[in-house]
Amino acid sequence: MYPKEFRYTKDHEWIKVEGNIGTVGITDYAQKQLGDIVYVELPEVDDEFSKGDEVATVESVKAASPIFIPVSGKIVEVNEELEDSPELLNQDPHGKGWIFKVELSDEGELDELLTAESYEELIKAEGE
Amino acid sequence: MKKTPLYDEHIKLGAKMVEFAGFNMPVQYKGVIEEHLTVRTKVGIFDVSHMGEFRVKGKEAFDYVQYLTCNDVAKLSIKQVQYSAFTTEKGTVVDDLLVYKVNDDEYLLVVNAANIDKDFAHLSRFTDKFDMTLTNESDQTAQMAIQGPKAEDTMFKLFGDVVREMKYYWFDYVEFEGEKCLLSRTGYTGEDGFEIYCKPEIAAKIWQKILEAGKEYGIEPCGLGARDTLRLEARMNLYGNDMDETTTVLEAGLGWICKLDKGDFLGREALLKQKEEGLKKKLYGFEMVEKGIPRHGYPVFHNGEEVGVVTSGSYAPYLKKNIGLAYLPIELAKAGNEIEIGIRKKRAKAVTVKTPFYKREKK
């Protein structure tokens, strides 16, 4: 369920790093908790953020939820497909439902994130 | 946290449960959008057992209800239902409710779950002045709502002709396995539909039977999530969001249930005065022109000035638009005015529109 090569946050974002570019989305657990996602407010390309900043907003029918950036860096690409098809976050959260790509400014920050194993433990504890 | 008599059914059906007004309630089963569309096009069933039920009985039951609610109870026939509100001395809203005329000396009042204790305390302040009794039957009453174009066909299978003959906002009694239940043609979705009140002990069985009867029409259980989006599309106010004790019934857009000429009632003078002087603000509908979803509490701007606040807002699953209600200065509270909604750091364009946003086609 939760790819081993991803890293995760306690706020239910995932990041997949290739070179110094990280692709970020929300986890399957998060999309299930949110329910039908109907709108995603994307960041602007070239905007810079520090780890933990609010970078995007995912809106379900019921509520708006902030997305926090897992690592510091500059936004290099956003998933424009989400503008017309926000439901991709429900259908394929770890794939086509990616939200943005960030150029990492400090790869060391990755070590502070959760592995798939520890993330699965976290959501198991939350579910109980 | 309280459980409704249908709690086990929700768990069996895999509902996602949330706390609402002190009750553990299903917010959704398969998903809000799917449930919303099911009610608009087929039929859905909701557990609304959290709602409160008060019975007013006695020689002066009529005078009592007439004094404490703003709609005209004299207009009701036996077995008829009326949407109304309890008002304060200031004409503001204690709660909105349904008044069921059981008999000339007996009324059933159905109130919001979150307000049961507050309403009961408010109503109790006036019981000494009238020859009647007030009882809170909320814990002894289960309630389900069956809503949608196929609600009549579904309920007909269980209860027969009484269902087809019942008019909108009327009620009657039906029997389920020897137990008397109250069935009314009412609801909070903007669709045709029914609400059934019964003893908690038989609620689960009725729930199962209705699901079974509605199967051929595509019935689905629906949660509070869909209940909220359905009522908003139909522009039905939600107490605590769209109105409360700081807003008058007139400001909340409920002038149609405010019968100032019916005789004395609590808040009448304040409301008469407000009507004479003219309203300064009013709850009005809008839809987004630019992207973004309005939510409760977001500010409203006009010509750069903050002029109001969003009370309800959502993506509307049937209309596929983002819609909301907001208190606006009276000069803006008509269709076609450009406003902006403050959504986080941005301001997004919206336009005021006439409500209801959605209106079902009459048969």
Image: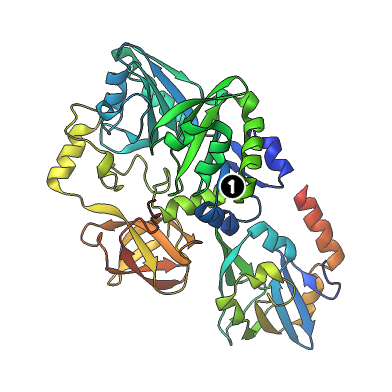
Q: Find disc 1 in the rendering and name its residue.
A: B223
B6 to B177, vertically: above or below: below
Q: Nearer the viewer, residue B9 or B182?
A: B182
Q: Is residue A8 above or below residue B101?
A: below
The picture places residue A70, in percent across and down from the top left corner, at 70, 73
Task: Please tell me which residue lies in front, A48 or B177.
Answer: B177
Taking B96 as reference, is B302 left or right?
A: left
Residue A71 sits in quarter? bottom right
What colouring method underlies this structural image? rainbow
Instruction: Please tell me how crowded label 1 is: few (under 14), some (14-19), or many (20+) other residues with Cα within 10 Å.
Output: many
Q: Badge 1 sits on which subunit?
A: B
Residue at horizontal 64 percent and vertical 24 percent from the top: B201
- The answer to whether residue B51 is left or right of residue B275 is right
Instruction: Give x and y (percent) for residue A67.
Output: 62, 68
Residue B232, position as x, y percentages in the image: 43, 53
Judged from this view, the residue extending furthest toward the front is B161
| Left or right: residue A6 compared with residue B322 | right
Looking at numbered disc 1 in the image, what kind of residue is underneath it?
Answer: Gly
Judged from the image, the secondary structure of the residue bearing numbered disc 1 is: loop
